[in-house]
Image (cartoon, rainbow, N blue to C red):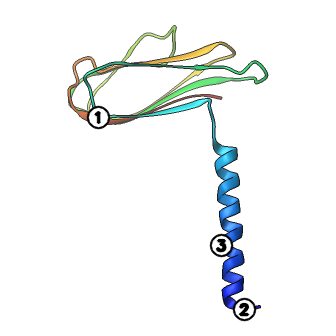
């Protein structure tokens, strides 16, 4: 087999694999926020699907802030205070309904955060 033909086939197979991975990996049960504007709070809700069973709602917070922020990882949870270098994961039991996560900049005015909110 010619090297160019083999390389072309390998690239096509790779592109097909990547395409399939993107379709399979697209998930409406997950939201990602990149926060560098600490002027307003964020509230996010993810509704459960009626035909799907869930076990957990998960909120991951990673990054840094110059002061205290508040994360409420679920509707009935008390807000958690986080400050400075942050790498936290909150995993709460979840069945059906809406998973609600709230972020409040509280005292922080600067920083970079990545917040992942998902249900599994």
Quarter of the image for the N terminus: give it: bottom right
Pick the residue in front: 42 or 101. 42
Q: Are marks 2 and 3 in contact (CB under 8 Å)?
A: no
Q: Are marks 3 and 1 in contact (CB under 8 Å)?
A: no
* Lower position in the chain sequence, tag 1 or tag 2: 2
Characterize the local packing of mark 3: few (<14), some (14-19) or many (20 or more) Cα atoms within 10 angstroms: few
- The location of residue 106, given as percent across then percent down, is 26, 17
Q: What numbered label is drawn on residue 2?
A: 2
Q: CA distance from mark 3 to mark 1?
A: 38 Å
Q: Is residue 80 above or below residue 10?
A: above
Q: Is residue 53 above or below residue 111?
A: above
Q: What numbered label is drawn on residue 115?
A: none
Foreground disc of the pair 1, 2: 2
* Lower position in the chain sequence, tag 3 or tag 1: 3
Q: CA distance from mark 2 to mark 3?
A: 14 Å
- The location of residue 74, given as percent across then percent down, is 51, 15
Give the residue at mark 3: 11
* Helix, strand or loop under label 1: loop
Which residue extends farthest bottom? 2
* Helix, strand or loop under label 3: helix
Quarter location, residue 81: top left
Pick the residue in front: 102 or 16. 16
Residue drawn at x 29%, y 21% is 105
Q: Are marks 1 and 2 in contact (CB under 8 Å)?
A: no
* Lower position in the chain sequence, tag 2 or tag 3: 2
Q: CA distance from mark 1 to mark 2?
A: 51 Å
Foreground disc of the pair 3, 1: 3
Give the residue at mark 1: 36
Quarter location, residue 83: top left
In the drawing, does residue 112 fall left or right of residue 13?
left
């Amino acid at each position: 087999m010619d090297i160019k033909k083999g390389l072309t086939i390998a690239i096509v197979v790779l592109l097909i694999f990547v395409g399939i991975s993107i379709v399979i990996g697209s998930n409406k049960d997950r939201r990602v926020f990149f926060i560098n504007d600490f002027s307003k709070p964020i509230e996010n809700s993810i509704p459960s699907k009626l035909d799907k069973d869930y076990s957990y709602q998960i909120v991951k917070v990673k990054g840094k802030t110059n002061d205290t922020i508040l994360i409420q990882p679920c509707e009935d949870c008390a807000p958690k205070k986080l400050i400075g270098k942050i790498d936290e994961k909150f995993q709460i039991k979840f069945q059906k309904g809406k998973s609600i996560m709230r972020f409040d900049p509280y005292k922080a005015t600067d920083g970079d955060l990545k917040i992942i909110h998902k249900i599994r």
